[in-house]
Amino acid sequence: MKTLSERIKFRLKALNKSQAGLGKYCKVKAPSVSKWTSGMTKTLKGENLLRAAEYLECDPDWLASGKGFWHTDVSMTSECTSEHEDIEHQALPEFELLAISPLFLNDFIISTSDIESSIASIHYTEEQYRRMFGAKEPHNIRITNIKVDNMSGTLEPGDLVFVDTSTTKYDGDGIYLFVFSNHLHLKRVQMVGHTLRIISDNSRYQTWSISQKDKTNMTVLGKVLISQSQIFQRF
């Protein structure tokens, strides 16, 4: 979608909202909204842009420029004849499975792992995705399952974890997926002085450290954003 009018009409259609509602929310008259949707107005700025983005439930930068988190490469005609197809394409961002795969084995020798593969992909609507991940780019999010119980109390075996693979170095305390000593770890990492403490939330497992000289042997693959329990009850 290369023009402002296409983006506005796309979001109005997706949300089943009207131009009249847009004008009322933005406190502008109908002729102004008509210029937005006809292509006579090429861009929005200031309060009009912010209020329009709120009404259309999209990112202001995307609405203004077509770039950013809500950008899509699917083309539209000015009459929006392919809008239905576009909505289906936009509404289902897919997350590829994060797993021990050629992606990792090509670069690392991994003998043991804290994770395993059981789910290939998950689909979310735009609203669900934004509520869970905010402005994170979908192509940076990967999913995997917990294999062991060393994070029990926080993450249980079988739980899904969503990992931000754009984080490739220590970026504040948190739970990280990283390779060290031929092991693919998913652990809590905490900086103490110049040393990284590697913490298992299950007290049965000892905390260990990675010294400053050994940090070069640690490769961060991502930082855990959220988890989803996989506890099932049988009735």
Image: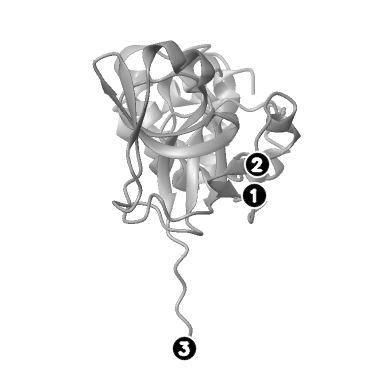
- Can you give x and y, in whole percent of width and height, for residue 29 in the image? 35, 26
Under circle 3, the secondary element is loop
Q: Residue at x 61, y 45 (%)?
A: 92
Residues under numbered marks 1 and 2 in contact, where contact means CB atoms less than 8 Å apart: yes
Under circle 1, the secondary element is loop
**Applied colour scheme:** one colour
Give the amino acid at mark 2.
Answer: Glu
Numbered circle sitting on residue 235? 3
22 and 49: which one is in front?
Answer: 49
Give the amino acid at mark 3.
Answer: Phe
Sequence-earlier tag: 1 or 2: 2
Under circle 2, the secondary element is loop
Q: Which residue is mark 2?
A: 96
Left/right placement of residue 118 relative to residue 181 reads right
Left/right placement of residue 192 relative to residue 208 reads left
Q: CA distance from mark 1 to mark 2?
A: 5 Å
Query: Dividing the picture into quarters, in which one does residue 67 lie?
Result: top right
Q: Residues within 10 Å of mark 3 (few under 14, many from 20)?
A: few
- Can you give x and y, in whole percent of width and height, for residue 129 in the image? 48, 43
Query: Dividing the picture into quarters, in which one does residue 95 lie?
Result: top right
Q: CA distance from mark 1 to mark 3?
A: 27 Å
Give the amino acid at mark 1.
Answer: Ser
118 and 128: which one is in front?
Answer: 118
Q: Which residue is mark 1?
A: 121
Q: CA distance from mark 3 to mark 2?
A: 32 Å
